[in-house]
Amino acid sequence: MPTQSTSKQLWRDVQVFDGLVQLSEAMTVLVEDGRIAGLWPAREFNEAHAQGAACAGRSGVLTPGLVDCHTHLVYAGNRAGEFEQRLEGVSYEEIARAGGGILSSVRATRAASEDELIAASLPRLDALLADGVTTVEIKSGYGLTVADELKMLRVARRLGQLRPVRVITTLLGAHALPPEYAGRADDYVSLVCDEMIPAAAAEGLADAVDVFCEGIGFSPAQCERIYLAAKAHGLAIKAHAEQLSNLGGSALAARYGALSADHIEYLDEAGVRAMAEAGTVAVLLPGAFHVLRETQLPPIELLRQYGVPMAVASDANPGTSPICMPTLMANLACTLFRLTPREALSGMTAQAARALGRLDLGRIEVGAPADLCLWDIQQPAELAYAVQAGRLRQRVFKGEVVYAR
Ligand SMILES: N=CN[C@@H](CCC(=O)O)C(=O)O
Ligand SMILES: [Zn+2]
């Protein structure tokens, strides 16, 4: 894999999507010591601006490295059989209530060692990197014991050491009720609050805590207990909410200052208002919408009206979105949810970073970490327009060209 590590590098005559908008003319971008050190319209650039800098790339479209802000990348096994069942008319909820779904991945993941999980997850991570990802959030949630949830989080952290990518981890102990707690959901929530969250926090294994607020997940009252425990341990919170029904999970999460509420197909206006007031990001997951053949659309127009930031993520997971291609998500966000290409790209860069509480990422601006992608396209909208692997010419992580062709 070609790499370059000169500390001062230039990208010349590039069209720049800065994470929010496309800049109006071709630019020259200077990277020094891992950060963006200069940004000039190409016609104003003069060599005195960047003496000693090597030219690392020329022409094409430069975007921030993509931020995949919602994935379940670490798991064992696969659920192709359930895909077939759903095509025959069995619903996701019916499969879950019969002990399949998430619990099927829990059985396989509990049985796998850390090394086996690394081996299973690396190809999925590599697929994300090949499509331009420089920051990825990875959730636990297929362990559902203290030891197995921590095992998943350790694997996620190790993935970040094995590849040039920033990994942000989220504890999702409240993903499903494990069979050994059948009929005792509140006791399981106590385990999450009293043991899982403190252990993950003490070992520095989680950046945030997530819940699945749903009929087949956990009630708003149970989620609230988890939010209180997360906050007591200084962890950010997130929610899988309003995916299959409207329980008010997004508004609850917003009241607790959640970074994001994700899925949100069944979100109502009160929920949108609560998210706007709290600055909670709406994370749209068109892969799960597509794979589940969902028909209830998230309230995009209301989110726009209230100014709720919208992110887009892969939700890569074995059940609802076995897809590791963020640029396909940009396409689906446009075709299925009617986002504009600009909204979709911003949703996978600046707004995705916001959903992770990382306002420093997902932007091309002076001072920001130099996580960048150079694409062989003419204009940013092409990333959402065409579904095509192989357009990435360079991936730059912390100022280093870690992939080039
Ligand atoms: N909805 C809950 N969690 C995942 C799916 C997990 C699974 O089915 O394995 C999601 O984001 O879609
Ligand atoms: Zn998810």
Image (spheres, rainbow, N blue to C red):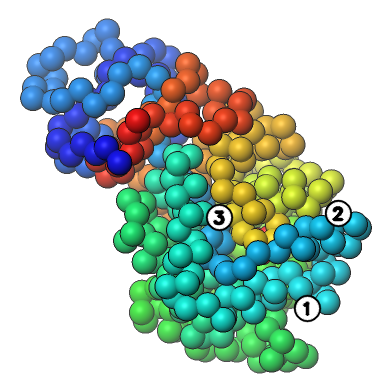
Image spot of residue 309 (x, y percent): 57, 43
Residue 327 numbered tag: none
Q: Amino acid at mark 1?
A: Gly
| Residue holding disc 2 | 87
Q: Residue shown at 47%/78% (left/top)?
A: 113
Q: Residue shown at 78%/53% (left/top)?
A: 292
Q: Amino acid at mark 2?
A: Leu
Compared to residue 377, the image places residue 339 above or below, namely below
Rounded to the nearest angstrom, the CA distance separating label 2 from label 3 is 25 Å
Task: For the residues labelled 1 and 2, say whether their Cβ atoms are less than 8 Å apart.
Answer: no
Q: Amino acid at mark 3?
A: His
Question: Is 165 or 274 nearer to us in this picture?
Answer: 165
| Residue holding disc 1 | 99
Q: Is residue 5 left or right of residue 88?
A: left
**Label 2 CB less than 8 angstroms from ligand 1:** no
Callout in the foreground (1, 3): 1
| Local SS, label 2 | helix
> Where's the C terminus, which quadrant?
top left
Residue at the right extreme? 89
| Residue holding disc 3 | 70
**Label 3 CB less than 8 angstroms from ligand 2:** yes
Rounded to the nearest angstrom, the CA distance separating label 1 from label 2 is 18 Å
Image spot of residue 234 (x, y percent): 42, 73
Q: Is residue 197 left or right of residue 45?
A: right
Q: Residue shown at 70%/76% (left/top)?
A: 103
Compared to residue 355, the image places residue 393 above or below, namely above
